Amino acid sequence: MDWLERISELRQWTRSGTRAPHKPLLLLYALGRFRQDDGDADGGLRYSAVEQDLQRLLTEYGPPHRTTPAYPFHHLVSDGVWEVRTDRGPGSPGTGVRDLRETGATGQLVPELRAALRHEPELLGSITRLLLDRHFPPSVHSELCEAVGLEPEAATVERLTAVRPQRDPRMRRLVLTAYEYRCAFCGYDGRIGTVTGTVPVGLEAAHVRWWAFGGPDEVENGLCLCSLHHKLFDKGVLGVGDDLRILVSQRFVGHSSAAREQVTALAGRPVIGPQPGTAPLAAAHRDWHTRQVFHGDPRPALPV
């Protein structure tokens, strides 16, 4: 059984680039629990016991609209990697939250996958890397792994290459050059001196439409952002409006002067664009981010 191939073909809602990371998040959580138990526990995950954990993951790493962990807990069974049983016997009672709770629904990785993970220790890292690369931006990989009890272990390149093309390593250089090595949101342009000159530090190339969702490795899909604003952009706190002004989510809460100066004060400011002659940020990619990543409504611009 090629488990990487099977997991790469998880059935998900995919219309118009819609994000639906419910199943990947459940799988990552289950893999984390498997790792924490050293692969020995076969008792499974009782829905009522893990519901809050799964809901927190969906809230933090899922789509902007409200959703429920009951959906992947039931539907992942159809992908051949997950099984559910209740106090009445094998089989899921459906996606109803009350039914999952009251029947003692318990899910776990199928026995064949558990056996493969025990027999091939490197498989856990390969599956982890596959799920991260296909469904989440690099800026959240480490913290997501920490949240589910995993390590972002390096997967076998040869196996993953057949499943998903590799990123273009030139993307970062092209985007940073286009934006003249300064953050498009705050203007930060820090460098550090080395024996061969100076190099940018704390600046990253952000994919606007995530690579995991068909976003191309092209300048028109990139923004040069400082590390802080890249993370906030990928978490839906920040966005870019149709008028190329910065959006700040009304859901963001920060009372310190640092939060005001570095985040809320950005609302309504124009994005610092790329240098003349460079492809501007494409409207289609900007629109995808607004629909699939940005959380809630934007704050009004602060008075000057």
Image (cartoon, rainbow, N blue to C red):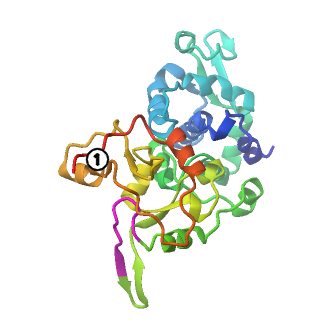
- What segment carries the magenta color? 182-192
**Residue 181's image quarter?**
bottom left
Q: Residue type at mark 1: give it.
A: Thr
**Does residue 248 sit above or below 83 in this rendering?**
below
Figure check: 49 above or below 238: above
Residue shown at the point (46%, 41%) measured from the top left: 294
Figure quadrant of the N terminus: top right
Q: Secondary structure at mark 1?
A: helix
52 vs 304, nearest the viewer: 304
In percent of width and height, residue 76 lies at 67, 29
Q: Residue at x 66, y 45 (%)?
A: 118
Question: What residue occupies the far right of the structure in this picture?
Answer: 1
Instruction: Work out whether residue 171 or residue 161 is closer to the camera in this orientation and state it.
Output: 171
Q: Residue at x 53, y 68 (%)?
A: 175
Most prominent secondary structure in the magenta stretch? loop
Specify whether residue 96 is in view: yes
Q: Which residue is mark 1?
A: 264
Residue 68's place in the image compared with 90, above or below, is below
Q: Residues within 10 Å of mark 1 (few under 14, many from 20)?
A: many
Q: How many marks?
A: 1
Residue 194 image offset from top left, x and y in percent: 39, 86
In this view, which residue lies farthest toward the left?
Answer: 257
Residue 58 at x, y percent in the picture: 49, 33
Depth check, front residue: 261 or 286? 286
Is 283 in front, or is 7?
Answer: 283
Q: What residue is shown at x 34% (from left), y 49% (from top)? A: 268
